[in-house]
Image (cartoon, helix red, strand yellow):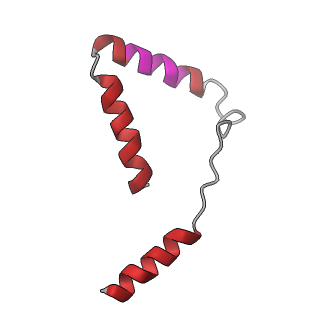
Amino acid sequence: FVACLTLLALLLGTSSAQLTPDFYCDSCPGLLDAVRNQIKLAVARENRMGASILRLFFHDCFVN
């Protein structure tokens, strides 16, 4: 069990993300505006949605 955890920790330490803020600029130029508009609409309909989306992103960072 300890050996598996150690191996997992070593593998996680060597990974690196390749995403950048402009990752989708060429393949989907309107993506950022579309997502921003939908987020604004969702928060306007339900005030708690902002916190819910932030929590989703926070947890997604750790789960991948």
Pick whichever, 28 or 5, lies toward us.
5
**Magenta run includes residue 39:** yes
Task: Please tell me which residue is depicted at 62% across the width and 23% down the height of the picture.
Answer: 30
Task: Please tell me which residue is depicted at 60% across the width and 55% down the height of the picture.
Answer: 17
Q: Give the range drawn in magenta.
A: 34-41
Q: As displayed, is residue 30 above or below residue 61?
A: above
Q: As displayed, is residue 39 above or below residue 55?
A: above
The quarter of the image holding the N terminus is bottom left
Task: Indicate the position of residue 32 as horizontal and vertical percent values.
Answer: 58, 26
Q: In which quarter of the image is residue 45?
A: top left
Residue lying at the far top in this picture: please name it: 44
Task: Please tell me which residue is depicted at 37% across the width and 84% down the height of the picture.
Answer: 4
Task: Indicate the position of residue 61 as horizontal and vertical percent values.
Answer: 44, 49
Pick whichever, 60 or 38, lies toward us.
60
Pick whichever, 59 or 34, lies toward us.
59
Give the dominant element type of the magenta stretch: helix, strand or loop.
Answer: helix
Q: As displayed, is residue 58 above or below residue 43?
A: below
Residue lying at the far right in this picture: please name it: 26
| Count of marks placed on residues | 0
**Magenta run includes residue 31:** no
Task: Indicate the position of residue 19 as horizontal and vertical percent values.
Answer: 62, 47
Q: As displayed, is residue 59 above or below residue 41?
A: below
Task: Indicate the position of residue 53 as horizontal and vertical percent values.
Answer: 36, 32
Q: In which quarter of the image is residue 57?
A: top left
The quarter of the image holding the C terminus is bottom left
